[in-house]
Image (cartoon, grey):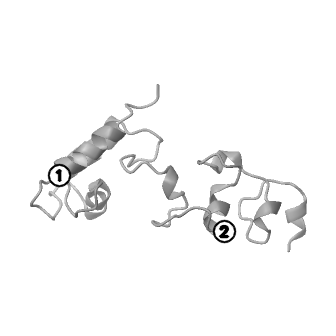
Amino acid sequence: MSDRCNRGAVQTGCRDCAPEQCVPDIANDCNHNGIPDHVDILVGHTADLNLNGVPDECEVPADFNHDGYVDAHDYALFNGCMAGPDTPNPPSICDNTNFLLSDLNGDHRTDLRDFAKFQRSFTGGEQ
C-alpha cells in the first residue's frame, strides 16, 4: 500500500489505498455520502452501468450536456431526435449517439413517451 494513503491528502485514484484511507473529495461526491464517487463505484456501493464514472443514482437522464440542469440546451438536442412511435431510426439531423440518449424510456424510439420523461426532468437552468 502506498505511503501517500496515510497522509490524509485527497485521493483522486485511491487504487493503492483502502477506501477508508481516502479523504473524500467532496467536489466529486454527488450522492453526499462522504465517499468520493469513484470509490463508491470501485467498491460496489453504487452502480455505474454506463461506465462514465458518475454513479447512476446521480445522473439525470435528460441532462444531455451534463451541466446539472435540464434546460433549453438539452431540449434542442432532444427535439432534433424526436422521431415518433413507429420510427426506430434517428431523423437526419440527429446522430445515433444522441438518438440513443434521447430514448429516455429505453424502447428504442424517441417519441412522446420520452418527451413526458424529459418534461418531468426539466429544471429550466440555473436559478
Residue at 15% x, 57% y is 91
* Quarter of the rendering occupied by the N terminus: bottom right
Residue 36: x percent and y percent?
68, 55
Of the two numbered discs 2 and 1 on the same chain, state the one appearing first in sequence. 2
Residue 63: x percent and y percent?
40, 46
Residue type for callout 1: Asp
Count every numbered label the image shows and give the total: 2
Circle 1: element type: loop
The residue pinned by badge 2 equals 43
The foreground one among 24 and 95 is 24
The foreground one among 45 and 67 is 45
Circle 2: element type: loop
Give the residue furthest to the left: 86
Give the residue furthest to the bottom: 1
Residue at 82% x, 61% y is 21
The residue pinned by badge 1 equals 111
Q: Cβ–Cβ below 8 Å for labels 2 and 1?
A: no
113 left or right of 44 in image: left
90 left or right of 22 in image: left
Residue at 64% x, 45% y is 32
93 left or right of 25 in image: left
Query: What is the spatial separation of the Cα atoms under label 2 and label 1, in whole angstroms?
Result: 37 Å
Looking at the image, residue 121 lies above or below residue 101: above
Residue at 37% x, 31% y is 124
Residue type for callout 2: Val
Looking at the image, residue 112 lies above or below residue 49: above
Density class for disc 1 (Cα within 10 Å; few <14, some 14-19, many ≥20) is many
Q: Quadrant of residue 75?
A: top left
Give the number of the mark in front: 2 or 1: 2
111 left or right of 75 in image: left
